[in-house]
Amino acid sequence: MHRHAWLVLTVLTLLLSAPYPAAAQEGTNNRDTRSAVTVHVVQDGETVTSIAARYGLGVETLRRANALGAYDIITVGQRLIIPAADRIEAGAATATVGLGGSLDQIAARYRIPVEDLARLNRIANPAGLPAGQEVAVPAATPAGGPLVRVVDSLSLWRVALAHNISPTVLALANGVEHPALIAPGRLLSLPRDVEAPDDVMAAPLASVLLHPLPLQPGRTGGLRVETREPGTLTVTFLDSDWPVVSEGTQHRALLPVDRWTDPGVYPLTLTFTGESGTSATLTQMVSIVDGGYPREVIRLTGAAAETLANPADEAGEIAYVERTMSGFSEERHFAEGPFLLPTAGVLASGFGTERAYNSDVFDRYHTGADLGGAPIGTPIYAPADGVVVDTGLLDARGYITIIDHGWGVYTGYWHQSAIFVRPGDTVTAGQQIGTIGNTGRSTAPHLHWEMRVHGVVVDPMQWVREEMP
């Protein structure tokens, strides 16, 4: 999978990567991974899956050609052999399989025979594609409009009538020779100018959306499910049942992925029971790809090295943070849209950076985003609405503030010089809650900004870049 150093850009000019000597919190793991070296030059953001899709290769074909194992990492600048006999036109478009999606949906969207699309992508089992897999389509193939699946109560004529389309035009566009004999389950692609949602799910499910795909370790997926009647939805993923917030026929859930989760495919199961007694279960594999986190080796001496050698000294503080930044409330405090940045400064150390201390064993990672380069006293703002659950002074983290944003989302602010809020206060996005400091185990003024979703440590900068869920 692809691992690379990444830079976070925002409308503020503050997120420029730079060395920064600040102490920060970490997670631990005993895992170590290595990259293979091998004529496609790997670019920033590419993965084995996306490169294979670009050239119309099966992922395993590309791996075999380059002696890549299932968990080997590719890096920016690495050269990969592309088997010439399997190459299609470079620059081909790619489509991502969504949750509840399938190869036949992509084929219908691009009006390509599903057998041709499977052959183009070397897919042996078209019915078993994981959500998040990228599929290549011919470069000059335009995408169609919304999809409708024909069920027993529908016909091509009824679909055309419902969307004010000529039945003849709809039949010709979808290659239907005998409209009266169209089989239940057939997908029809409507014209691109038709404004309507896809209607491809079997009742009582209406639509499902998991974003962003593929998922990545240390980041959060937002799940939205619409059903045809009110009821109860359960979500099982990564061996856990996740809380669901339901409002009538709309259901939402946040799916955090632990930083040390290995890239691969994992089953996600949705189980819905309607108020009328109807039920449905959807199980699909979901792709988790490498997060592209960088590595750094840190050499410590003196008191810092002694602290490193005695991790039990901080165990109580870590337990306090884990306990305080957990819990779930169905009340959502944060508004629609991305979070704000909590302060001005430079992104000195991003979330997830793997670290080795005085050794070559990368068994820890940075659990937050360090924003530095600003002097002591620089304001810290609430990135979203929420309720302050605790403030105080800790040995390692200095002066802290912890905010509950609802739906299991918590943010923490370490090393402050001053705190302007108290436990129980309600804060709004943009309200000042404190100032940047150098308290606790810190070697320079900075803010360590940490986020947990359902108790899982995740990248807070993702929430600045993307709306959740």
Image (tube, rainbow, N blue to C red):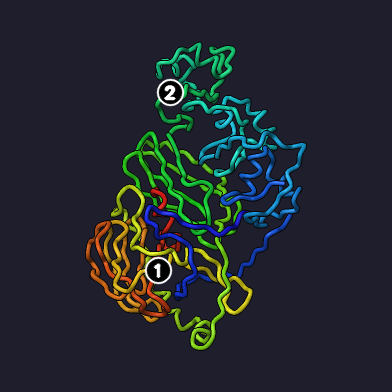
Give the quarter of the figure containing the N terminus. Answer: bottom right
For the residues labelled 1 and 2, the Cα–Cα distance comes to 48 Å
- Find residue 387 and report its image quarter: bottom left
Type of amino acid under label 1:
Gly
Q: Quadrant of residue 107?
A: top right
Q: Residue at x 53, y 15 (%)?
A: 171
**How far across and how far down the image is residue 301, in percent?**
54, 85
Judge by depth and name the residue closer to the eye, 296 or 147: 296
Name the mark nearer the viewer: 1 or 2.
1
Label 2: state its secondary structure: loop
Q: Specify whether 136 is left or right of 442.
A: right
In the picture, the disc for residue 372 is 1
Inspect the image, locate mark 2, and give the three-letter code of the amino acid beneath it.
Asp
Please name the residue shown 67% across and 39% down the image.
55
Position of residue 67 relative to residue 250, above or below, is: below
Q: In the rendering, at what x and y percent does residue 155 appear?
A: 48, 17
Q: Residues within 10 Å of mark 2 (few under 14, many from 20)?
A: few
Q: Where 339 falls versus 159 (above or below)?
A: below
Q: Which of marks 1 and 2 is nearer the N terminus?
A: 2
Q: Which mark is residue 164?
A: none
Residue 256 visible from this viewpoint: no
Q: In this view, does 81 lie to the left or right of 308?
A: right
The residue that label 2 is drawn on is: 193
